[in-house]
Amino acid sequence: MITLFADDLVVTLDDPGRALPVWALPVFLEEVEAFGVVLGFWANLLKSQALDLALQRETLNELRQRHPFGWEDDSIPYLGPCETLLQPKKEANTLLILLFKETHQRDLNGLKHIIDLNRIN
């Protein structure tokens, strides 16, 4: 799942070992860079963060050595709430997705009142 908000890009993978093997991460980052060229933004990898939700320890260690992200162990602050691992690892990805939906739903609910005020009958 890819979530875009203002100048943030959040990528959530259900099965990172299958969806993005270690050797494919540089290719993925090149695609993000190409996407940014089209939209006029660039990814600051030194400020980027990654949160392990289901990787095998060996894979995670290899990724940490190869890529300059801030590899977090239990949470990433994003738009206020702190995305965190509160569930067993196999359920954590679902939790992360739900937190994003919850955040956006709260934002949409706040906008609804503004939109209702501006309606003309």
Image (tube, rainbow, N blue to C red):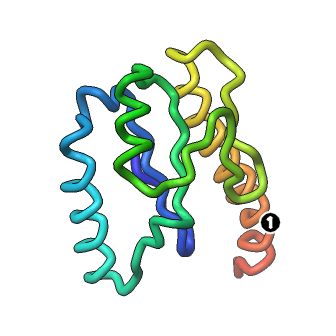
Give the residue number, with chain letter if any, for mark 1: 113
Q: For the residue marked with disc 1, what is the amino acid?
A: His
Residue 6 x/y as whole percent: 56, 73
In the structure shown, which secondary structural element does the residue marked by tag 1 occupy? helix
Task: Please tell me whether residue 10 is drawn above or below residue 96 in the rendered image.
Answer: below
Residue 40, quarter of the rendered image: bottom left
Using a 10 Å C-alpha cutoff, classify the residue at mark 1 as few (fewer than 14 neighbours), some (14 to 19) or many (20 or more): few
**For residue 67, side relative to residue 110 (left or right):** left
**For residue 117, side relative to residue 69 (left or right):** right
Image quadrant in which the C terminus is located: bottom right
Residue 63 x/y as whole percent: 37, 41
Residue at 52% of width from left, 60% of height from top? 48
Residue closest to the far front: 65
Image quadrant in which the N terminus is located: top left
Residue at 56% of width from left, 66% of height from top? 47
Task: Please tell me whether residue 15 is drawn above or below residue 40 in the rendered image.
Answer: above
Task: Please tell me whether residue 60 is drawn above or below residue 109 in the rendered image.
Answer: above
Which sits in the foreground, 74 or 41? 74
Residue 24, quarter of the rendered image: top left
Which sits in the foreground, 80 or 70? 70
Residue 95 x/y as whole percent: 61, 28
Residue at 35% of width from left, 49% of height from top? 66
> How many callouts does the rendering have?
1
Task: Please tell me whether residue 108 is drawn above or below residue 111 in the rendered image.
Answer: above
**For residue 6, side relative to residue 57 (left or right):** right
